[in-house]
Structures are given as structure tokens and as C-alpha cells.
């Protein structure tokens, strides 16, 4: 696996392109639940909201460690410490929701913003999920992610989350 990443790094010196190549390669064969689209569309959509190289790389790689065979150690030689730490902050802790939340809360604000854009993208595809899953995601958004967006004063993100909460609360209350 490290050889594959080395090959990609040899092909390009552009860090964002490298992150995208890695994400595309290792997410190959994975599809978005409900959408049926290749999984890579999700990290690309998250990255599209961001401006800096560091933020875009974190967004593109944010599910690679969690959902593929890649480990942080495999990525470390090719990316800055800030990018590796950002990816680590966004990687779930062995299905431990509270530990995962603590990682997010202790992350730098730019990493928290990436997570919020991740949540927004995930909320945009909830309608294809079972009602219980929708209810769980709505509750999590309402009790954790919306307050986080308010805390870091990201009003555009707050409005977007409120829009999805309003839409899906209507669905689950029927």
C-alpha cells in the first residue's frame, strides 16, 4: 500500500491532487448509500467548500483511514503534520461516539468546519435511509453539530443545518 502512495507522490507534487488520487484509489468500489454514486463524490463535495490546501487535503482524506485499509502511518510521509492530525481528528474512535466527539471538540476550528461540511453533505442524502437512521442523524445533528456550528460562529453552516433539520424532522414526525 505504501508503494502505491509512493507512486502517486512520484507522479505529482501537488498535495491536493495527491490526496485526491489516494482517496479515489482506496475508495474505488465503494458507493454512497442511497445515492449509488462512487464514494469519491462525497469527499470531493466536502473539499469544494474549503479554501486552503491543508483543508482540502483533510477533506479528501477524511474517510480514507476510517473506511479503507490505509492507516495514518501510511499517509504521514507524504503530508504535513497538520493534515495528518486533521485526518486523525475526523477518524472515528472504534465506534465510541463520545471519544469521537471529544476529538472533534478538541480539534482546531478549521478541522471542525471540515467536519460540519461533512455532516451537511451526509444530511443532503438522508432521505434514502430508513426512518430510524434519519431520526438518529437528526438527533445527533441537533444536539452536537448545530451547537458546534453556533459555537464557532459559522452562520452559513448553522442555516444549512437548520434547513436539513426542518426538512427531516417533518419526515420523521409523520
Image (spheres, rainbow, N blue to C red):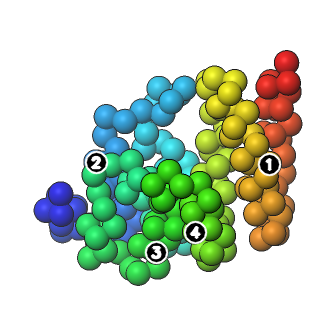
Q: Earlier in the sequence, mark 4 or mark 3?
A: 3
Pointer 4 residue: 103
C-alpha distance separating marks 2 and 4: 27 Å
Q: Nearer the viewer, residue 3 or 90?
A: 90
**Looking at the image, is mark 1 or mark 2 nearer the viewer?**
1
Total labels: the figure holds 4
Position of residue 154 measured from the top left corner of the image (x, y, whole percent): 79, 65
Q: Earlier in the sequence, mark 1 or mark 3?
A: 3
Q: Quadrant of residue 124?
A: top right
Asked whether the residues under the numbered discs 1 and 2 touch, taking CB atoms below 8 Å apart as contact, a structural biologist would say no
Indicate whether 74 appears above or below 173.
below
Identify the disc placed on residue 25.
2
Pointer 3 residue: 85
Asked whether the residues under the numbered discs 3 and 2 touch, taking CB atoms below 8 Å apart as contact, a structural biologist would say no
Q: Nearer the viewer, residue 26 or 88?
A: 88
Position of residue 151 measured from the top left corner of the image (x, y, whole percent): 81, 69
Q: Earlier in the sequence, mark 3 or mark 2?
A: 2
Identify the disc placed on residue 142.
1
C-alpha distance separating marks 4 and 1: 18 Å
Looking at the rendered image, the quarter that the N terminus falls into is bottom left
Q: Nearer the viewer, residue 61 or 44?
A: 61
Q: Give the residue at x 54% y 26%.
A: 34
Position of residue 155 measured from the top left corner of the image (x, y, whole percent): 84, 61
Q: Quadrant of residue 88?
A: bottom left
Local SS, label 3: helix
Amino acid at each position: 500500500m505504501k508503494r502505491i502512495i509512493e507512486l502517486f507522490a512520484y507522479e505529482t507534487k501537488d498535495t491536493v491532487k495527491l490526496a485526491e488520487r489516494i482517496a479515489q484509489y482506496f475508495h474505488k468500489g465503494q458507493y454512497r448509500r442511497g445515492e449509488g454514486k462512487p464514494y469519491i463524490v462525497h469527499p470531493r463535495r466536502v473539499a469544494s467548500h474549503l479554501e486552503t490546501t491543508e483543508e482540502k487535503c483533510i477533506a479528501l482524506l477524511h474517510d480514507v483511514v476510517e473506511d479503507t485499509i490505509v492507516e495514518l502511518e501510511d499517509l504521514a510521509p507524504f503530508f504535513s503534520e497538520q493534515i495528518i492530525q486533521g485526518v486523525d481528528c475526523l477518524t472515528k474512535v472504534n465506534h465510541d461516539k463520545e471519544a469521537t466527539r471529544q476529538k472533534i471538540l478538541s480539534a482546531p476550528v478549521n478541522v471542525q468546519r471540515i467536519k460540519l461540511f461533512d455532516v451537511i453533505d451526509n444530511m443532503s442524502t438522508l432521505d434514502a435511509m430508513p426512518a430510524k437512521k434519519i431520526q438518529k442523524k437528526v438527533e445527533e445533528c441537533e444536539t452536537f453539530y448545530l451547537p458546534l456550528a453556533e459555537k464557532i460562529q459559522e452562520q452559513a453552516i448553522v442555516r444549512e443545518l437548520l434547513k436539513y433539520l426542518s426538512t427531516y424532522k417533518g419526515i420523521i414526525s409523520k
